[in-house]
Image (spheres, coloured by chain):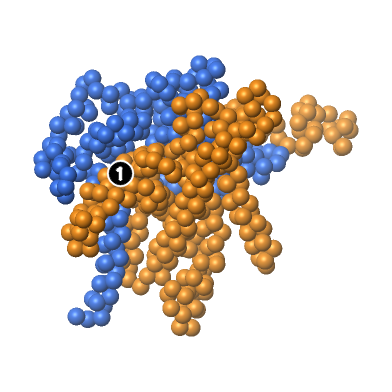
Amino acid sequence: MSTAALRWVPRGLGLGLLAFAVFGPIGNLVLWAFAERWYFPHALPSQYGFAFWARVFAPRADAWGSLFLSLQIAVLTVAISLLLAVPAGYALARRSVPARGVLLLIFLLPQAFPSLPIYMNIARLFYGVGLNGTVPGVVLVHSLHGLVLAVWIAAAAFAAVDRQQEEAARDLGAGPLRSFFTVTLPAALPGLLASAIFVFLDSLDEFTGTYFVGVPDITTMPLLMFHAAMGGDYQIASITALILLLPSFAFMLVIERFLSADVLAKVGG
Amino acid sequence: MSATFPSEAPRSAWPIRRLTGADPWGLLLLAPSLLLLLALFGVPAVYSVVGAFADKDGKPSLAHFRIAFGVYGHDVFFTAWLVTLSVLVIAAGAVLIGGYLILGSNRTAVRLLAWLYRWPLFVPMVCAAQMMRSFLARNGMLNNALEAADVLTPMHAVSLLDWRGVLITFVWKQLPFVTLMVAGAMAALDRSMIEAARDLGAGRLRVLLGVVLPLVRGPLLVACVLTFVTLMSVLSVPIMLTADSPTMITVDMAYRINTFGDYGTADALGVISYAMTMLVGWIYLRHAARERVLAP
């Protein structure tokens, strides 16, 4: 064997081990999702099938309700976060605001503190005003991190827009609102879309905040998965987990198309 | 103040502009976001600190901290070293993977690695916990693979569902994020310095540790601080992977609230977790300040 081929031995071994570390846990989850019988100490299930999928997706099963609830909460969270973050990001990128650095830091604070103690106190406050266990309550909790993410990406997206185009529009007689909606907003749209996807995924996957604020009535997909797992329903838990994995993988594969390098370079700038 | 001159009267219609010289629209556009942040972060944060330092009647007291350290002292310690160890392992892994991505000589291997490492990037923590619960169990895929490879006999197979499971899950989930940040910073480096070191005969590992690592220490530290904060408040992984004590203080906080309705002790544990992240943040800021002083 040539030396070039020999060098593939350590390389292949390293990559192979990493591949097993990355895909092994996912593979084990997939096995559980399709296992109908799996007895200790067998390495593989003795019978595969879709019986548990039928149970999860039975017309009146919990999964449909949880899926729609999760999607509803995620869409509302994106709406609230972007509605607030687009003007805020624009102000941070384009208007002269006092103490801009401090404001950017304030928008970073929720990311710099452990969120669990915050969530349990939000739950305590919400309990007093009847927001616990309601969709608006959970949407508000998800909006905390959604807003922070969206403001940072929106500020970067607006900062990356070419100022000369805006000035050209103003010179041609467009008012500030018109130049914003016809020039600035369309140019920043890919970045804003990326932040919308980020916020959507963040809300879809959110566990801890929903755990505290959602009780007892709001069972989103992650909560459904958690309860199935703690109840020992490995198949149900694995099937729900797989459904949650699909959007995560899809986003991981397309992320670079949405977040261009010039926007990423402006994050925090 | 010049704004009091009559000639500038139109500007004084906005008091805020008169005071700061700033554009009132900017603050107006920011106000809704800041209000939501105040309501959903500022107020609960103040509540948690006040609740931690007060007794049942609202008087200042350290009683909750006595329970927190007395009953959960070993969990506080466990959380601190487990999260620190996870961050260190993740940082080492990220530097190695990032290093191979820019120094690797074989393009196919580099492309394969770049494709491979990022899969867990957006996987929810709960899903990662569920995967690891089956993967690391005594009859899970890891032990089965080791037995098939004759590394292990079924007699010696052990369940890794304790601190090791939490560590493995944290590394699995967070390594891609830190690697992405580190590899991004490495890719932006000036290649000529690396080439020069290589030409002088330095091995790849030496170039990585001696030339590349010092240049990306900033982004690496930021990613590590963010990861530390994230891991400090993960509830699902320790609940699902560590059946009994010791466990992370997040589990203790949920337990105090769900079982006893005891917000005081939970808040005290929360303040302890703030203190740990502030310590890490302080180390980072001190380092960043020193870098700035040293930088030309």
Q: Could you tell me residue B276's position as x and y percent?
A: 58, 47
Q: Amino acid at mark 1?
A: Arg
SS for callout 1: helix
Left or right, B79 with respect to A8, comes to right
Judging by the rendered image, the residue that carries numbered circle 1 is B133
Q: Nearer the viewer, residue A95 or B58?
A: B58
The vertical placement of B195 against A65, above or below, is: below
Q: Is residue A3 visible?
A: yes
* Residue furthest left in the image: A47
Q: Could you tell me residue B264's position as x and y percent?
A: 58, 29
Q: Which chain is blue?
A: A
Q: Could you tell me residue B8's position as x and y percent?
A: 84, 32
Residue at (19% x, 27% y) in the render: A55
Residue at (62% x, 24% y) in the render: B56
Left or right, A135 with respect to B155, comes to right
Q: Colour of chain B?
A: orange
